[in-house]
Amino acid sequence: MLTIGALVFLMPLAWMFVTAVKPAEQTMTMPPQWIPVSWDVAESGQTVFVHVDQQSYDAAVSAGDDSVEVNFAYQWVVDRGGDAVPVLVSDKVLNSTHKINAHWRSIAHDDRPVRILEPIEGIADEDLVRVYIYESEVMGFPHKVMRKDLVLHYDQTQRATQRSYSFAREIEVGMETLEKRYIAWDDRKRLAHTETEARFVSLESLRSSADVRWGNFGQAVEEMGQFPRYLSNTLILCVLTVGGTVFSSAVVAYGFSRIDWPGRDKIFVIVLATMMIPFPVTMVPLYGLFRELGWIGTLKPLWVPAFFASAFNVFLLRQFFRTIPKELSEAARIDGCNEWRIFWQIILPLAKPALTVVALFQFLATWNDYLGPLIYLTDQSDFTLALGLQFFQSQHGGTQWHLLMAASCLIVMPVLILFFMAQRTFVEGVSMSGLKG
């Protein structure tokens, strides 16, 4: 029964991993398709990956047809300096005006993208040009560069064409100059200026094979845009909250377990009672307090409270500290140690399993925290991974499940690896601190 229950709970996790390596069309098929496949057909002497509706294919096979409708993806490209540049075709007639996307870059500034602020036609290579140099997609600074240091780059992807410094450039070429280039069906939403067409092909020329889309992970990181920034913010919070929680909880737990002082047990009961207060009750007062302190829109509300201990962690460590023989502390006092030295050099080294459990609990809580960042953070550059994942889901009109699950896998994977690496210490720490005392 336990095995069956474990398998049932693992199903959503398995679905997430499988969906992460599928193409978009196979994520919501009914019945569910566990193994991702790809279809290809020979076209103009090359292998082209196409889209085939599985139900249409099964119906054609059952009916004994010799052909089935498939979808092709392609681009119109034109040669520019040896590069095949995608073209937005306006009218498929001779000598029409079409558009290509491009942007300028400055080789004198680490090949950063720039936006030209004044006309540059006809000026000499040694002349200075006023430009805006981008350090990110939206931030930059005005500057002057020499004309010879400016290089025109043609944008190949949709993401590149949507950047603020990309511009559409009109060209007048005939259709005989344009080349029709077939692309993989999976790349039609990634590459710039793609088109699709449906045609019937013979069943004999159509082939299918299992194909795991490992590229979904890289595409998910690219689509999220600020994934490295989200990861950096989350790691900073994890380090600060884990360090603050372990230290403050250990100090408080030591006072409740190893030092006798009047009213100690009554105060400890009051501390434990704070565990009964749900977070929504304190959410509004805490927000008002942090707003008065000017901390809204910063990371401070998410890590400063960790340095004031929490009732659960204090309880966990107190139970463990009580299992350490008091004779050790008394012998240390006879040798001249004060309470701080006893705590730091004797008790803490013996409490490593319990401290590890507290650190793991706090790391998991901070890594997966969504509500706290949602309440206190206002700037996207301060978002954590959990909040960035939600932002990634909501910024698209239709959810791209394969990319969303790929991003979710990247976020969940470190937690799973950490848990399995520290599983033994985690179980030992919980059993020694939670069941004894």
Image (cartoon, helix red, strand yellow):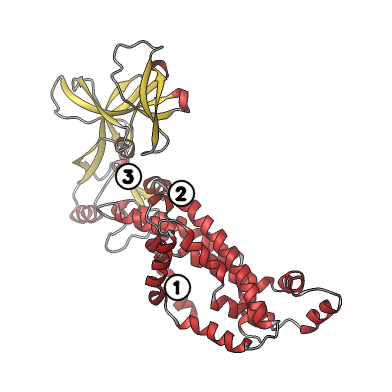
x 48%, y 28%: residue = 110
Residue 355 is marked as none
Q: Depth-wise, is mark 2 or mark 3 nearer the camera?
A: 2
Question: What's the distance in space between the residues labelled 1 and 3, CA to CA?
Answer: 32 Å
Q: Which residue is mark 2?
A: 229
Q: Extreme front residue here? A: 292
Specify the amino acid type for callout 2: Arg
The answer to whether the residues at label 1 and label 2 have Cβ atoms under 8 Å apart is no
Taking the image as shown, residue 54 lies to the left or right of residue 373, namely left
Marks 1 and 2, how far apart at CA? 35 Å
Dot 1 corresponds to which residue? 7
Counting residues from the N terminus, which is met first, the one under dot 1 or under dot 2? 1
What's the CA distance linking mark 2 and mark 3? 27 Å
- Which residue in the protein does label 3 denote? 186
Q: Amino acid at mark 1?
A: Leu
User: Mark 1 against mark 2, which lies toward the viewer?
Assistant: 2
Q: Are marks 1 and 3 in contact (CB under 8 Å)?
A: no
Q: Residue at x 67, y 77 (%)?
A: 254
253 lies left or right of 23: right
Q: Amino acid at mark 3?
A: Asp
